Image (cartoon, rainbow, N blue to C red):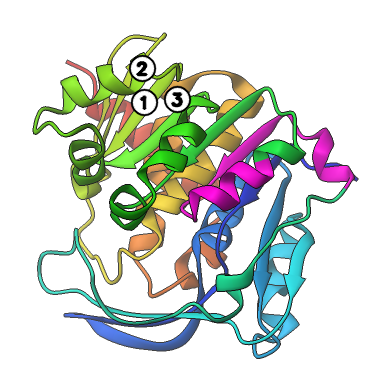
């Protein structure tokens, strides 16, 4: 069975602390959040590596959601991350990172995955992203990154961006990558590299779209209770690309991305994302539509 989209990303064991509680050794990582969110709109396939210390049962809920896992390698010890948030929930302070098996990860794309038309290169070493691009021929590639790769692997990162259709990053990353405090200028510089669209995430303040569909500003869903924002950006990305893959409308896809991200923020790790129903998603989507009416 071939996936509709392939998601390259991490599988993590996270320890989290926020002003509203803690969570010890919970499932995390960009591919986990993104694939769980994507499963509501399409059939995603995960391309990643996990350690022998992560039990298979931890991934069972993804199988139930129709997520394909044959692209996951198992070796060594699992990638682990510990982070803490203060009352500014838009930025995490990294307390500890253990790359473990992720440091030696060399992805091999399964044959069935090569049929997928959409590819999400979630935050990872640009050299790994480029290796996956060499093994696949999707019609649409979306790439995410982070400050570490911007600072330490700028050249291969720019090469990977040039081979992508959509660039997605947060506002700080956009400013650093294109060396300008102005997000409009940063987006235009990204478009000059050849991508068709740029999505700039602004945390709880929503996201911005620049590209062939013009400019669009998507608000964040106003939450009364936020427990843990970890994985919200990856959730947004997975929901966005899967909905776009099926329906071809970037603006609607961004709103669905914001809706799914809002559910992620309501629980620690993936606890809320595991429980959310399609009915709840559609209710919030309808509310988001009303927010933009004037």
Residue 198 tag number: 1
Nearer to us in this view, 36 or 103: 103
For label 3, the crowd category at 10 Å Cα-Cα, with few meaning under 14, some 14 to 19 and many 20 or more, is: some
Which of the two marks, 3 or 1, is nearer to us in this view? 1
**Relative side of 53 to 193, left or right:** right
Disc 2: which residue: 191
Which percent across, then down, holds residue 125?
49, 55
| Disc number lying in front (3 or 2) | 2
Q: Is residue 62 visible?
A: yes
Residue drawn 78% across the image and 55% down it: 108
Q: Is residue 119 left or right of residue 265?
A: right
| Highlighted range, magenta | 111-132
Residue drawn at 58 percent across, 41 percent down: 120
Label 3 sits on residue: 252
Give me the C-alpha separation between circle 3 and circle 2.
Answer: 21 Å
Is there CB contact under 8 Å for labels 3 and 1? Answer: no
Q: Whole-Å distance between the Cαs marked 3 and 1?
A: 15 Å
Q: Position of residue 250 (x, y in %)?
A: 46, 22
Q: SS class of the residue under badge 3?
A: helix
Q: Is residue 240 visible?
A: no
Residue at x-position 26% and y-position 38%: 177
């Amino acid at each position: 069975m071939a996936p509709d989209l392939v998601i390259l990303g991490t599988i993590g064991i996270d320890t989290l602390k926020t002003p509203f509680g803690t969570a010890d050794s919970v499932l995390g990582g960009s591919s986990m959040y993104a694939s769980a969110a994507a499963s509501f709109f399409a059939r995603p396939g995960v391309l990643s590596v996990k350690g022998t210390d992560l039990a298979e049962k931890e991934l069972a809920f993804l199988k139930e959601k129709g997520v394909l896992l044959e692209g996951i390698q198992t070796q060594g010890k699992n990638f682990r991350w510990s982070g803490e948030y203060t009352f500014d929930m838009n930025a995490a302070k990294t307390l500890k990172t253990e790359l473990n098996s992720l440091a030696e990860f060399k992805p091999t794309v399964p044959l069935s995955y090569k049929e997928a038309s959409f590819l999400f290169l979630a935050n990872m070493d640009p050299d790994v992203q480029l290796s996956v691009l060499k093994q696949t021929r999707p019609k649409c590639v979306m790439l995410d990154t982070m400050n570490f790769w911007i600072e330490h692997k700028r050249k291969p990162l720019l090469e990977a961006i040039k081979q992508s259709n959509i660039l997605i990053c947060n506002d700080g990353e956009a400013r650093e990558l294109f060396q300008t405090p102005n997000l409009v200028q940063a987006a235009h510089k990204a478009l000059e590299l050849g991508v068709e669209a740029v999505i700039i995430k602004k945390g709880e303040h929503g996201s911005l779209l620049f590209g062939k569909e013009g400019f669009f500003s998507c608000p964040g869903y106003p939450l009364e209770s936020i427990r843990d924002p970890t994985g919200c950006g990856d959730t947004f990305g997975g929901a966005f690309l899967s909905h776009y893959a099926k329906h071809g409308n970037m603006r609607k896809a961004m709103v669905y991305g914001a809706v799914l991200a809002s559910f992620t923020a309501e629980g620690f790790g993936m606890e809320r994302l595991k429980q959310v129903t399609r009915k709840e998603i559609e209710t919030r989507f309808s509310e988001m539509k009303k927010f933009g009416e004037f």
